[in-house]
Amino acid sequence: MLALAAAIQLAPLAAPLLLSTDTYTYWDYGRVGAVHGGNPYADKPSAFPDDPAYARMGADWRDTTTVYGPAFTLASEGHAAVVGESAGAAAWSYKALAALAMLGLTALAAFLGRERAFAAAFVGWNPLLAVHFAGGGHNDAWMMALVLAALALGAVGKRQWAGAAWVGAIAIKWVALVFLPLRALEARAEGRRVGHLGFAAAAVVIAALATWRYGTGWLEAFGPLAKNVREGAHYSLPSRVSSLGIPHDIAVGIFIAVFLLGYLWLLRQAWRGRARLALCADLVLLTTPWLIAWYAVWAVPLAAVEEDRTARLLALGLCAYLLANAVPL
């Protein structure tokens, strides 16, 4: 199962960059800091239009400061310094890192899942994830590898390291925050000790580095995300509903309300001792106005390790829907 999963997840490395220019966006944000001495949280890529990454990055992001967490932004600066002005090296290295993260996710799912072969196949045999990570180089696989690492470290009693892994995941993409209250409430219900010290130490270190490098601008990275909410992705469910004649803002408001109600129910479940992280990820994907195909990785690994039939069916359904609508076959 693992060998076939590795073959599937690594195969797109032989292809050129697929379906997205996000790796060039990462490269440009990294170069803003590493090469131009700017601040990716304050200086837009359009301030450096002669940069080799600028012409290749997505046009929608040229006048937007980075939306990523400080851990990823610091890493992207290091990446930019290493690859220099080579577009090929920039894209392929991000593809390789994302592919390695997918292999890590597959192995961690196999470790955490009671049905290990099933968990490995559920993650590693997913063609949608292979196309968008080894093919597209997206950083969501990094975030989810750290989320599953946190779960695995907690499972073997390495609580402080688990806390640090949670901070790392959140500092790559903020969406990982949505899982943390559920785990905290579950731990409280079970009387399970958690790694407060590891979490706090990692948070202080990353916050200190980010503030030293970027000032307080990194705290405002949520701001540009509001633009995505206003516009929406055309195959998100709020956008589908708005296409029926309901104003987009009203459709978004309805789905935000659905998310809040669903999340309150999930908090109640966690309070009773069951943190349904996979179902939470499904809920986010079903209600977000900005649904992108590779976001499926938020749900798939968690559904693989949790014995939650509803979450698994929703994750598979979302993958099938996104494969049909977001991947040209």
Image (cartoon, helix red, strand yellow):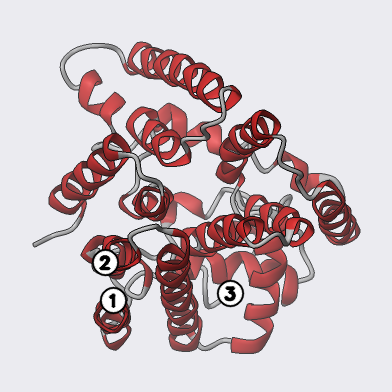
Closer to the camera in the image, 320 or 65: 320
**Image side of residue 323 versus residue 282, left or right:** left
Residue at x 32% of width, y 38% of height: 311
- Quadrant assignment for the N terminus: bottom left
Tell me the residue that label 1 is attached to: 5
Residue 251 spot, x, y in % from top left:
33, 15
**Image side of residue 236 versus residue 60, left or right:** left
Measured Cα–Cα span from mark 2 to mark 3: 41 Å
Closer to the camera in the image, 50 or 208: 208
Tell me the residue that label 2 is attached to: 121
Residue 197 spot, x, y in % from top left:
87, 51
Residue 301 spot, x, y in % from top left:
40, 56
Are dots 2 and 1 in contact, CB under 8 Å?
yes
Label disc, if present, on residue 51 of the rendered structure: 3
Quadrant of residue 80 within the rendered picture: bottom right
Q: Is residue 6 visible?
A: yes
Q: Nearer the viewer, mark 3 or mark 1?
A: 1
Say above or below: 47 vs 7: above
Measured Cα–Cα span from mark 2 to mark 1: 7 Å
Closer to the camera in the image, 319 or 68: 319
